[in-house]
Amino acid sequence: MYKGYIKMTNKEQYVITKRIAKHGSQAIIVVPRILEDKLKPGMVVQLNIEIIEGGKDGS
């Protein structure tokens, strides 16, 4: 099973590599609990998405 990993690049930047999860009919990215105290409701964050490996449908 792919667990993913977190890499701290500096004080306020993190690289998260994870498999996309599914919630109903939507694809979601689950934020690791280790970042729970860093991210608060109302914060604006920048997400850069790089597709490393295709999904189940072969894309």
Image (cartoon, grey):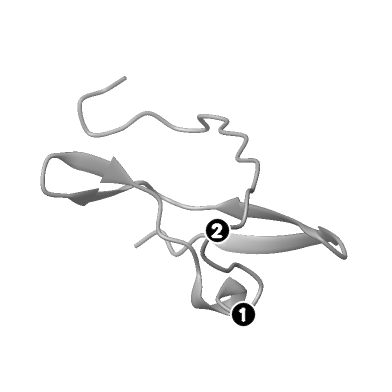
Above or below 14: residue 39: below
Residue linked to disc 2: 42
Residue 50, located in which quarter of the rendered image? Answer: top right
Q: Amino acid at mark 2?
A: Gly
Q: Amino acid at mark 1?
A: Asp
Q: Is residue 26 left or right of residue 5?
A: left
Q: Position of residue 16 (x, y in %)?
A: 60, 54
Above or below 4: residue 32: below
Q: Image point 87% across, 65% down: which residue?
A: 11
Image quadrant in which the N terminus is located:
bottom left
Q: Position of residue 8 (x, y in %)?
A: 78, 63
Which callout, 2 or 1, points at the residue further toward the start of the chain? 1
Residue 10, located in which quarter of the rendered image? Answer: bottom right
Q: Secondary structure at mark 1?
A: loop
Residue 58, located in which quarter of the rendered image? Answer: top left
Image quadrant in which the C terminus is located:
top left
Badge 2 crowding class, 10 Å Cα cut-off, few under 14, some 14 to 19, many 20 or more, is: few
Q: Secondary structure at mark 2?
A: loop
Residue linked to disc 1: 37
- Label 2 to label 1, Cα distance in Å? 13 Å
Q: Image point 72% across, 61% down: which residue?
A: 7
Of residues 29 and 39, the one nearer the viewer is 39
